[in-house]
Amino acid sequence: MSVLCTDTAKPCAYSPLIRWLTMTSNVNPCRFLAAPQSGPQASEPQSRTTLILAAHPDDEVIGATSVLTSVGGAAYVVFLTDGAPLDAALWSSHQQLPRSDYATLRWRESIAALSLAGVSKERISCLGAVDQESAQAVPLLVRRFATVLADVRPDIVISHAYEGGHPDHDSAALVAYAAVAMAQPMPEHWQMTSYHGANGSFRCGQFIPSPDADPYELAIELSPEQREFKSEMLLCYESQRSVLQAFVASADSERFRPAPDYDFALPPHPGKLWYETQGWPMSPRMVRR
């Protein structure tokens, strides 16, 4: 995560096609994620295993604190990248450190944050990509994530959407899509929100409407206690504090949707992608190749 979020999600005014299923935070969201066809009245799942594939350490808290706090120690978290770009100028802090030390710092922060939700370090892993470079290793990352899925056999996988917000978010969407399709048994595949720049403006906490997506999203309203807990988890990522301030201040809900059937050979939306506007080294052509 490397940008400030200044525009949080607004209810469904941006798309008349979406039906919002709103749940309060005292309900386990996995009750619905595990059996979406049953609707919000689905029975409490038994022994459901949830796995979150996050592009960077801190993305799991930004997008899925409600899930982490509901399933606690039953969750697995897999990071696509180590959170340390090759160019130290892209780091949020600690530019004086060697890159390996910065990556270690990011790893330790993730363990501290997730421990608050009861996720042990044995359930946290990293696929080993370099931050901002994951698109160059997608086939390898798909194989690695497929191995994780075969070992864990999750009932639910939650990852990023393909929206052009960050190249690693897009890679995570592709890696999850490809690996889940090969998994036996195949888990329910859901997406959490991140950020994007569709229609020329920065948006955080809402999806780009997709013609290939199911016509509903699940909105989890966080209680005051859960918002405070999310803030505490984000504060564990001290190296990212400057870019996480808006998330600490404004997170009041989280949204999830079934993963659409993307055509990853096409851009996620017309016009410039958000990461194109940031001067980062990765181009859309490199991400989609």
Image (cartoon, helix red, strand yellow):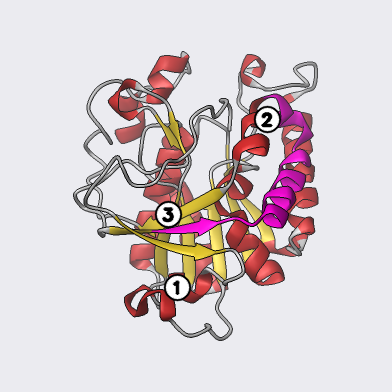
What residue lies at 53% left-to-right and 83% top-to-bottom? 44
What residue lies at 42% left-to-right and 26% top-to-bottom? 202
Image position of 46 with respect to 175: above or below: below
- Camera-nearest label, 3 or 1: 1
- Is residue 194 visible in the rendered image? The answer is yes
Magenta range is 218-242
Q: Is the magenta stretch mostly helix, strand or loop?
A: helix
Graded by Cα atoms within 10 Å as few (under 14), some (14 to 19) or many (20 or more), the crowding at tag 3 reads many
Foreground of the two, 259 or 26: 26
Q: Circle 2 sits in a helix, a strand or a loop, which is it? A: helix
Foreground of the two, 278 or 68: 68
Spot occupied by residue 166 in the image (x, y as percentages of width and height): 46, 31
Spot occupied by residue 131 in the image (x, y as percentages of width and height): 57, 32
Q: Is residue 81 left or right of residue 193?
A: right
Q: Is residue 71 left or right of residue 207?
A: right
Foreground of the two, 56 or 41: 41
Q: Mark 3 points at which residue?
A: 191
Spot occupied by residue 58 in the image (x, y as percentages of width and height): 64, 42
Of label 3 and label 1, which has the lower sequence position? 1
What amino acid type is highlighted by mark number 1?
Answer: Phe
Q: Name the residue under label 2.
A: 245
Q: Which mark is residue 202?
A: none
What residue lies at 58% left-to-right and 43% top-to-bottom? 59
The total of numbered circles placed on residues is 3
Foreground of the two, 20 or 98: 20
Image position of 27 with respect to 259: above or below: below
What amino acid type is highlighted by mark number 2?
Answer: Gln
Quadrant (top left, top right, bottom left, bottom right) of the C terminus: top left
Q: Is residue 101 left or right of residue 139?
A: right
Q: Name the residue under label 1.
A: 32
Q: How far apart are marks 3 and 1 (CA)?
A: 13 Å
